[in-house]
Image (cartoon, rainbow, N blue to C red):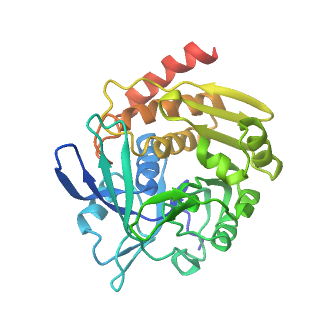
Amino acid sequence: MVFQSSSVCVVGSFSLDSIVVPGGDRFFHNLGGATVYTSFAVRTLEESVSVVSRVGRDFPETFFCRLREKGIDVSMVKRYPQELTTSFELCYNNDFSERVLKLVRKGCPIGFDDIPSDLRVKVVHVAPIADEISYDTMVYLKGCCDFLSFDPQGFLRRFDENGNVSLKLQVDNRVLGLVDVCKVSLDELFVLTGLSELNKAVQVVHDVGVKIVIVTMGAKGSLLFVDGACYSVPACQPSVVVDPTGAGDVFIGAFLAEYLKGEELLWCASVGSAAASMVVEGLGSTFFGEKQEILRRAAILYEKEFR
């Protein structure tokens, strides 16, 4: 029997985040990682979602309970008692406008043995955070879905001996030939393509077969490239900015949820922007807002910008 309990399957590592806030206060073991933010966004928009990942003996059972309570299928997440879970430290400045990210511990890669042999879903979204997904694994995942989505953030990161994070100077960009949609920051786009001019870099991504390119730019909004056209999608204004972590991951989760409903792409992007504006109003992966408020903000943005 084919495994198809959800519309979206998110693949990537969870992270046990240690958050350091101004004043030196520290919150240990916050549930983090792109997988968390993306899957929560999909569920908030009421699409079904499952996760493929692997965790170690230190991953709290309470986190599994939290994910299940939100309706996220974690039956494909494997615990390895001999391993430890990927962990990051996030240190924020006084107004939370900037953070320093440091790798504390890198978990093991996600490989073929971690993916059910009968997995079949509409969309697979690949969201690595610490280079845990290889090109060969992505080739395998391509055969498990109708539509492959990719956030290359963790694919592009490198870490020094102290865990400090930077972007690789050279990457294996064969993965782009597998992908239908790519959500990427501006800096990541330039590293991924080796180019420094936006339109040329996006064209390179399109030329290898990527149908939809989303370039996120934080408070400046995002750019949607599709069918040779570029659309500027403003950022929805949050009521307060507490923590910008995960905004891009929430954007793509909400975008994919609406895309699966058959909505047109500018509406999908508007919902992505609205959902991103909600998550920044809380610290870490603690607040995702309500569907009604996300759609309300999206409708205001859509009517103003695209009608």
Q: Nearer the viewer, residue 55 or 164?
A: 164
Q: In this view, does 12 lie to the left or right of 90?
A: right
Q: Percent x, y for residue 243? A: 33, 39
Location of residue 245 in the rendering, given as x and y in whole percent from the top left corner: 39, 44
Dividing the picture into quarters, in which one does residue 33 lie?
A: bottom left
The answer to which image quadrant residue 238 occupies is top left
Taking 148 as reference, is 23 left or right?
left
Quarter holding residue 121: bottom right
Residue shown at 67% from the left, 62% from the top: 170
Q: In which quarter of the image is the C terminus?
A: top right
The correct choice, above or below, for 54 with respect to 95 in the image is: below
For the N terminus, which image quadrant? bottom right
- The residue lying furthest to the right in this view is 207
**Residue 97: x percent and y percent?**
36, 36
Question: Would you say residue 276 is visible in this rendering?
Answer: yes
**Relative side of 30 to 299, left or right:** left
Residue 86: image x %, image y %? Answer: 38, 68
- Relative horizontal placement of residue 152, taking residue 35 as reference (left or right): right
Task: Inspect this view and state whether residue 127 appears.
Answer: no
In this rendering, is residue 187 above or below 289? below
Count numbered badges in the picture.
0
Q: Please name the residue shown 47% across and 29% down the image.
A: 219
Q: Nearer the viewer, residue 69 or 249?
A: 249
Residue at the image point whose x is 67% and y is 53% from the top: 192
Q: Return the residue found at the far front.
A: 161
Residue pushed farthest bottom?
82
